[in-house]
Amino acid sequence: MESYSWPAMSVPSPSVELAMRMSVKKEIKSALNAKPDSSVSKDAQESMVMKKKMILMTLENEFNFDGRSGNRHDMQHHGGLRGHESMLHHDPDWPHDHHRPLPQVPLLTNGQMVDDISPEQHALVPSYMAPDGGGGRRIHPLPFSDSAPPAQPRSLDPSKDLAAYGYGSIAWKERMESWKQKQDKLQITNRENGDHDDDDPDLPLMDEARQPLSRKMPISSSQINPYRMIIIIRLVVLGFFFHYRVTHPVNDAFALWLISVICEIWFAVSWILDQFPKWLPIDRETYLDRLSLRYEKEGQPSQLSPVDIYVSTVDPLKEPPLVTANTVLSILSVDYPVDKISCYVSDDGAAMLTFEGLSETSEFAKKWVPFCKKFSIEPRAPEFYFAQKIDYLKDKVDASFVKERRAMKREYEEFKVRINALVAKAHKVPEDGWTMQDGTPWPGNNVRDHPGMIQVFLGQSGGHDTDGNELPRLVYVSREKRPGFNHHKKAGAMNALVRVSAVLSNAPYLLNLDCDHYINNSKAIRESMCFMMDPLLGKRVCYVQFPQRFDGIDRNDRYANRNTVFFDINMKGLDGIQGPIYVGTGCVFRRHALYGYDAPKTKKAPTRTCNCLPEWCCGCLCSGRKKKKKTNKPKSELKKRNSRTFAPVGALEGIEEGVEGIETENVAVTSGKKLENKFGQSSVFVASTLLEDGGTLKSASPASLLKEAIHVISCGYEDKTEWGKEVGWIYGSVTEDILTGFKMHCHGWRSIYCIPARPAFKGSAPINLSDRLHQVLRWALGSVEIFLSRHCPLWYGYGGGLKWLERLSYINATVYPLTSIPLLAYCTLPAVCLLTGKFITPELSNVASLWFLSLFICIFATGILEMRWSGVGIDEWWRNEQFWVIGGVSAHLFAVFQGLLKVLAGVDTNFTVTSKGRR
């Protein structure tokens, strides 16, 4: 940092003093505006400019003297320059009264009067500036009359709000403290003697660690502005088009005309619901190096937050154990601190095949994990790594790599043989059911009636890899099932994992994966932490959603499995509003958001009017603002109070005796009951919900924690609680993902869409049209269920934190199956017209032809410009349009009727698991 020096100054008169202040300020600004050295890096230049601005702020405060003539005053240094020589020397000819102490505080502008002191001599003195309290810093000297006796300072009442005195010292104090903190951060690498050196080698490192962990990159204006203009033009053209259609009926084919107009109006509404959430598309960029600089300092334990990873599976015959094993192996070998990763596998089918496959996987992981980390291979799912048709020697300089890779491939082939033998054995079920190695019956022989099961395969005390290093925790979970209980399918299984993980590890973040979605990018979790752990952005982020990418899709993608229009266009548009919707897998959650709490409120800086002026000057404006804040407070503040201030009964410490202690204890007991009604009858789990940053009870033994974990997955645990209603994955639809994300956005949270250069996760896609249509049918049925429920975005969540464009996207996600009815009718009209010899429009005039032609041009232009800013190819866009028609006249139509039967008539339909075999 540059240093400045000035000659000795005297203050013979206010005019001379003012001239000197302006001269010094002019010199400082000229120094600040000097062009930087071109050889210095851009980051160093920005840092230098910031430091110079801080110097200017300091010096402006130093030279901000009272310039009124006729008043005698002296000048003191600011506290920040006490260590330097005095820059101001008084003129020896200037008369001073050395016997009378000059007041160091301003006049009292508001407050109670003291009888024995005249009003014009009242002083406002904080306790730390009182004579007996050792003085404080002097900011601005104030003149006092010579004839008046010296003012007696009056200390402030520490229990009273200082803003009530009417003086703006509080606002000044907040600004000064904020400035000091910024200055201290910028001077971390300064030497103790006060000299500044911009060439310090540690300065770029410290500046880099303070930089944001991600940034938002809007689409360039040359690409997005024409797109928006076409949308507006298309809206105008639609208005003229419908004006013509409505005002020109076909009298001899009125029914056909009416049906066509109704269908066209519905198509227009559907287009609006789909189009406007794409108005603000953005891209994002992450900085993994800054994340490491900030949270992984050399020689210190990693400060990255722990993450619990969930893998869900149901049927091992449709979801092969080898596929699940590859997913688990990619999780265990992820590039993240080992002690901060826990993997929980939910087996909702209670299959012994899944259990034994996981046991084999844990043994093979002891060899696979060190191999992955030693050579930094990608991907870390062995089946897909060894299947790559690339030069695996590229960028590998270790001489032992070829030998160890060959040995590891042989180990994996033997592992596959053992897994396939278990699968072959599972096809022949014994009459008496399966038995374990010790001869006891397998508890899950009856899939619909079995106790809860938990098995910890790996962990802190569960073995190490072949190099002696610790492995991440691996836990098998199968929740209890009994006849007569509604288990809520996948949503219920995920909520059971939330409770088990809270008892055993309680990481503040959760990653949800389907059993066929392996980690393709070992740094995927770090990518999400760039958003979750960002000091500015992270506190309001409820989840980070990654796009779905697939393996094994044919070259032409006949069934639009990639769904790139949705993942690369719609989701980017939502990210510019309030965030993408949750799509069921590849999503990192904030545990606290899953518990149904509101997003933290952003603190607004107090306005100068309310801090610097008396209360009466801003009158009704301030009072109105305060009243409004009070009306909005109870609902959100009650939840915050529950989440942060409750302590379990029996753990309360420091409660004073008497009435105060009884009241505090009663409040704690009441809060405890509310939390138990919300989260269930488990003191360990309830206590874990209070820890926003995660962590478990250190005093509890592993055996007691496992016992508690078994309790929280019992089939009756959720009775009379808010699980599935306000907490965890929300029940009421087979597409629980849309409903869960919708509830979070209604609580004011925002989500993030992260698209790394290397896809974070990859999964398996349906290989035939039948499986693909079953998948689309299930999604459409879930949307119909939401549309006919109380959680329908058309009427739910008003007055919360959901933005209106985000609401449009959720409405579109729930009503799109209904488009199948007008689509089928519109597709039938040409055949009817051909048979009857009539048409849906009258003879077109020149003006009418212009509107029809303009509408067709706008439709094509919208698609072309959309492909331009998103990077989606025309073949992918066209394939998506084709399958929209195929699904619309088949799966979507059946979903509408199934949904109506289920909701109105109570006829339930079976949940079909999509086959996830090796592609």
Image (spheres, helix red, strand yellow):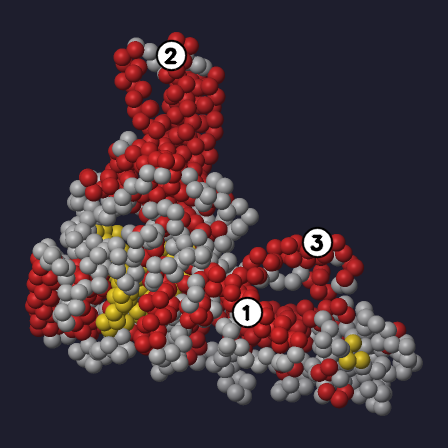
Q: Earlier in the sequence, mark 2 or mark 1?
A: 2
Mark 2 neighbour class, 10 Å CA radius: few under 14, some 14 to 19, many 20 or more: some
Residue 361: x and y in percent read: 17, 67
Image side of residue 579 versus residue 647, left or right = left
User: How far apart, in angstroms, are the residues tagged by discs 1 and 3?
Assistant: 35 Å
Q: Residue at x 17, y 78 (%)?
A: 466
Q: Is residue 141 visible?
A: no
What is the quadrant of residue 472 in the picture? bottom left
The correct choice, above or below, for 387 with respect to 470 in the image is above
Q: Earlier in the sequence, mark 1 or mark 3?
A: 3
Q: Which mark is residue 669?
A: 1
Q: Residue at x 88, y 73 (%)?
A: 119
Image side of residue 729 versus residue 654, left or right = left
Question: The residue tagged with tag 1: helix, strand or loop?
Answer: helix
User: How far apart, in angstroms, are the residues tagged by discs 2 and 1?
Assistant: 73 Å
The correct choice, above or below, for 326 with respect to 838 in the image is below
Q: Nearer the viewer, residue 701 or 417?
A: 701
Which one is in front in this view, the residue at disc 2 or the one at disc 1? 1
Q: Amino acid at mark 2?
A: Ala
Q: Earlier in the sequence, mark 3 or mark 2?
A: 2
Residue 492: x and y in percent read: 34, 55
Mark 3 neighbour class, 10 Å CA radius: few under 14, some 14 to 19, many 20 or more: few
Q: Which mark is residue 624?
A: 3
Mark 1 neighbour class, 10 Å CA radius: few under 14, some 14 to 19, many 20 or more: some
Q: Residue at x 45, y 45 (%)?
A: 791
Residue 537: x and y in percent read: 46, 61
Which one is in front in this view, the residue at disc 1 or the one at disc 3? 1
Question: The residue tagged with tag 3: helix, strand or loop?
Answer: helix
Q: Nearer the viewer, residue 241 or 342?
A: 342
User: How far apart, in angstroms, are the residues tagged by discs 3 and 2?
Assistant: 61 Å
Name the residue tied to disc 2.
253
